[in-house]
Amino acid sequence: MRILLKTDIERGDAWQKAFAEQAPDIDAVNWPFDGDPASIDYAAVWNMPSDEWARYKNLKAIFSMGAGIDHLASDPKRPKHLPVVRLVEPGLTAGMTEFAVWSVLSHHRFIPEYTRQRQARLWQGHVQIAPYDRRVGIMGLGVLGSDAAQKLAPFGFDLAGWSRSSKELTGVKSYHGAEQLPAFLQRTEILLCLLPLTDETRGILNARTFAQLPKGAAVINLARGEHLVEKDLLAALDSDHLSGATLDVFEQEPLPQDSPIWDHPKVQMTPHVASMLIVDSTVRFFVDNIRRFEQGGDLSPIVDFERGY
Ligand code: NAP
Ligand code: GLV
């Protein structure tokens, strides 16, 4: 059995070593592959060049090399008859939760403000806000959003989440659907976006959304760059309606050299690293799925392209 791997960041032979340890019968080959394309049974990909798909005639399923599948949803030549499995594994979830907790705590404790003050050699404290007086709102309460919510809850924040369907999560007020979005936004001082990118969520972090947040709110986008209208964010920061932002993802990646975001004093930014692939646990996820499928069981979780995630 053979799996083709196309990732965003080069890991040398780390994938091959992990497959050799966990499943010596599965031959893992890196893309680009110059062997016989008909010998490939499975493909685990990130941003596969669209024209490549036609070469792999015997594929049984596609794995997304990430939780998000927008790179496959927007690919006109993705073989539509094949199931697509998105990445849901504990290492990826833990990585995102670390980043989400860090970014919420950072805005809660005024770290971006203190970073700016340090540059100006300004010694000045901001009145500390008790966590129960801090209203944190998470857009998207799926695998990643609900884990982040559960890890933020013990800090004592006044937590809420917004999703398509209503949720019951201990310590998290649930808002759902377009009708409840305004109420969710009006109560949210630190907004964390962990939505998938779909036709409904593209551009959702826009001027209208920011206007509904209370003055001084902070926005954190760890999901996809296309959720955010960057010029609307910059306008809301420059008018002092928003106090700050943490961005891991951008409309265009890598962020263009001439983007004003690089130098914006109210923006903390990282280069799409909020949660990166952990090789061992990702391989375990692929191997478990392949074993189950080969024995007549189901792949999981399968993407619903009608729903968009
Ligand atoms: P998921 O389990 O599919 O959860 C998606 C959540 O969004 C669900 O709660 C869903 O509501 C909600 N949702 C979807 N469409 C909505 C809409 N129109 N209105 C309101 N809520 C909506 O996804 P996940 O695994 O948590 O991943 C979320 C995203 O994180 C990925 O798609 C990816 O883009 C991003 N990500 C980024 C990084 C990074 O390094 N920056 C790493 C991993 C993932 P229901 O629960 O009601 O269905
Ligand atoms: C990364 O962005 C992912 O979707 O896992």
Image (cartoon, rainbow, N blue to C red):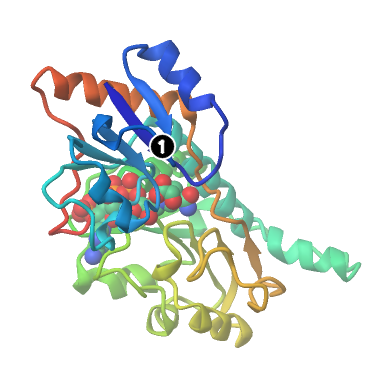
Q: Image height check: is 41 above or below 135? A: above
Image vertical order of residue 220 relative to residue 141, above or below:
below
Query: Residue at image x 53%, y 64%?
Result: 253
Task: Give the residue number, with chain letter if any, for mark 1.
Answer: 34
Helix or strand or loop: what does disc 1 sit on?
loop
- Relative side of 259 to 21, left or right: right
Picture coordinates of residue 102, whole percent (x, y): 59, 47
Report x, y in % for residue 38. Answer: 24, 34
Residue 125: quarter of image = bottom right
Residue 242 falls left or right of residue 97 = right
| Residue 186 % position (x, y) | 38, 74
Q: Say above or below: 306 vs 67.
A: below
Q: Nearer the viewer, residue 227 or 258?
A: 258
Q: In this view of the protein, can residue 173 be seen by the observer?
A: no
Considering depth in this image, is 231 or 104 the residue closer to the camera? 231
Front one among 64 and 67: 64
